[in-house]
Image (cartoon, rainbow, N blue to C red):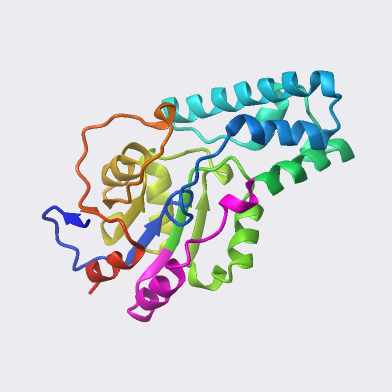
């Protein structure tokens, strides 16, 4: 399926993409299990492991509600601080580092770039189109950079923007405007492609970009914000973007 609404794309000079569910295939994830894995790596006693995992999950949900409500950024360290794991300058002790490593290993299978994107990006770059990623994330930039390097696509990305580096999160217009600025472009010269109508389509359009939608099944209901918005383009396969760039 590929649908479009009337809007000139002749002047588009960049494709900016969401990460999870757009650059990476969407997977169902057991969000409680991520924190059970952390707690186990952290060395939590069996009798306390479930309590710590539940507390971490509640702290994460609270953080993401704030992100959704006021469009401010969030960071993994805030979740740890909410349960009393606090070290200055994130100089974590050995137990916390072991928990973080276990947590990151849990997420590793969900971090791979969709195999169709590299050739699409190469084709677009051969036409002079810039490629960027703009992601709402609580994880450090270095994790994302490591995953792109593992997948051999770092050189295909002109700009990487992560909300965890900034004070805003999607759909705040400033994070879209900032990304366009990093590309040396006006927002009107950029198309943003993402899997969420509120954060991605609405956010991009509010900033003056084209908002393109990459829908899939399986978004948890508590992650969906209903919004009356019409994407300029609706795509279901990565290679469909090529026809929209002269």
Q: At x 48% / y 55%, what residue is drawn? A: 24
x and y, in percent, of residue 131 in the image: 41, 66
Q: At x 49% / y 67%, what residue is drawn? A: 157
Residue projecting furthest to the bottom: 126
Q: At x 64% / y 52%, what residue is drawn? A: 108
Reply yes or no: does residue 160 show up in magenta. no
Asked if 172 appears above or below 109 in the picture, the reply is above
Quarter of the N terminus within the rendering: bottom left
Q: Is residue 36 left or right of residue 74?
A: right
The count of marks equals 0
x and y, in percent, of residue 140 in the image: 64, 47
Q: At x 52% / y 44%, what residue is drawn? A: 163
Q: Which residues are magenta?
A: 107-131
Residue projecting furthest to the left: 6
Quarter of the C terminus within the rendering: bottom left
Asked if 63 appears above or below 146 in the picture, the reply is above
Q: Is residue 185 left or right of residue 167?
A: left
Q: Is residue 125 left or right of residue 6?
A: right
x and y, in percent, of residue 216 in the image: 35, 46
Reply yes or no: does residue 108 show up in magenta. yes
Asked if 58 appears above or below 140 in the picture, the reply is above
* Quadrant of the image occupied by residue 75: top right
Asked if 154 appears above or below 28 in the picture, the reply is below
x and y, in percent, of residue 182 in the image: 45, 59
* Quadrant of the image occupied by residue 76: top right
């Amino acid at each position: 399926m590929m649908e479009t609404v009337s809007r000139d794309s002749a002047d588009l000079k960049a494709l900016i993409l969401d990460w999870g569910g757009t650059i990476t295939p969407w997977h169902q994830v057991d969000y409680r299990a991520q924190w059970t894995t952390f707690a186990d790596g952290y060395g939590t006693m069996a009798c306390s492991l479930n309590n710590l995992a539940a507390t971490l999950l509640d702290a994460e949900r609270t953080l993401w509600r704030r992100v959704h409500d006021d469009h401010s950024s969030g960071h993994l360290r805030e979740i740890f601080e909410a349960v009393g794991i606090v070290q200055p300058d994130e100089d974590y002790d050995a137990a916390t580092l072991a928990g973080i490593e276990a947590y990151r290993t849990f997420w590793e299978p969900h971090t791979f770039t969709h195999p169709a994107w590299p050739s699409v990006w190469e084709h677009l770059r051969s036409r002079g189109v810039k490629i960027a990623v703009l992601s709402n994330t609580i994880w450090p930039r270095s994790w994302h950079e490591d995953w792109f390097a593992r997948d051999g696509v770092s050189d295909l990305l002109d700009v990487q923007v992560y909300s965890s580096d900034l004070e805003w999160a999607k759909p705040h217009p400033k994070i879209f405007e900032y990304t366009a600025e990093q590309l040396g472009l006006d927002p009107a010269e950029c198309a943003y492609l993402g899997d969420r109508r509120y954060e991605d389509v609405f956010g991009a359009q509010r900033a003056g970009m084209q908002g393109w939608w990459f829908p899939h099944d399986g978004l948890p209901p508590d992650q969906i914000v209903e919004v009356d918005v019409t994407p300029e383009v609706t795509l279901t396969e990565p290679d469909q973007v090529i026809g929209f760039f002269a």
